[in-house]
Image (cartoon, rainbow, N blue to C red):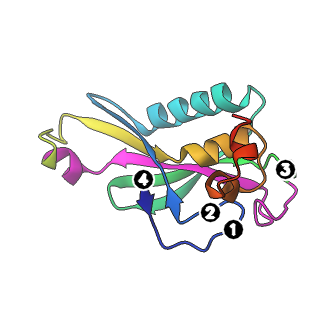
């Protein structure tokens, strides 16, 4: 479990868990990352899910991106959960930075890789149509027993 300075709202919490994804090998490309994440989104949220890969910044990946899915509450029209944008970020990702590969014992001239990090609460929130991430940490047994 980790903590971060974050303004708490329906889709952000200061306390969070994170699941990491890492693939390292010869010839791994950004297209592999994109395909893997889109397949994950379809399997998790259904074949009709709309995804958006946006450029972002993370210190251990370059290039970096965030994967967004269309807001389940408003259908992309804009609401309080998606802060009017129509999209919700589900994970951060990118190509593993050459320095990280080198520090891990891989020659970046030979190997490449991608990485992603996602919060299980955010994924569960979207999959189960939960409108406020703070419910997971509220201690209400009636809420938690649903799962």
Q: Do the residues labelled 1 and 2 touch (CB within 8 Å)?
A: yes
Identify the magenta region: 77-102
Instruction: Write down the residue under mark 3.
Output: 73
Helix, strand or loop at mark 4: loop
Q: Is residue 123 above or below residue 97?
A: above
Q: Name the residue under label 4.
A: 1
Between tags 3 and 4, which lies in front?
A: 4
The tag on residue 9 is: 1
**Label 4 – label 1 distance at C-alpha:** 19 Å
CA–CA distance in space, label 3 to label 1: 15 Å
Nearest-to-viewer mark from 2 and 4: 4
Residue 54 lies in quadrant:
bottom right
Q: Distance between the residues labelled 3 and 4?
A: 27 Å
User: Element type at marker 3?
Assistant: loop
The residue tagged 2 is 12
Mark 4 Cα-neighbour bin, 10 Å: few <14, some 14–19, many ≥20: few
Q: In this view, does 121 lie above or below 137?
A: above
């Amino acid at each position: 479990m980790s903590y971060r300075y974050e303004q708490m709202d329906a889709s952000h919490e200061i306390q969070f868990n994170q699941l990491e994804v890492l693939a390292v090998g010869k010839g791994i490309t950004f297209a592999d990352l994109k395909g893997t994440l889109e397949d994950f989104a379809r399997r998790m949220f259904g074949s009709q899910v709309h995804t958006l890969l946006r450029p972002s910044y993370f210190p251990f990946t370059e290039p970096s991106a965030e994967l967004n899915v269309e807001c389940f509450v408003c259908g992309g029209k804009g609401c309080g959960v998606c802060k009017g944008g129509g999209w919700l970020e589900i994970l951060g990702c990118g190509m593993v930075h050459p320095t990280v590969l080198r520090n891990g014992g891989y020659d970046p001239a030979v190997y490449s890789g991608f990485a992603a990090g996602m919060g299980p609460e955010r994924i569960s929130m979207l999959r189960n149509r939960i409108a406020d991430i703070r419910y997971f940490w509220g201690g209400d047994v009636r809420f938690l027993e649903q799962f």
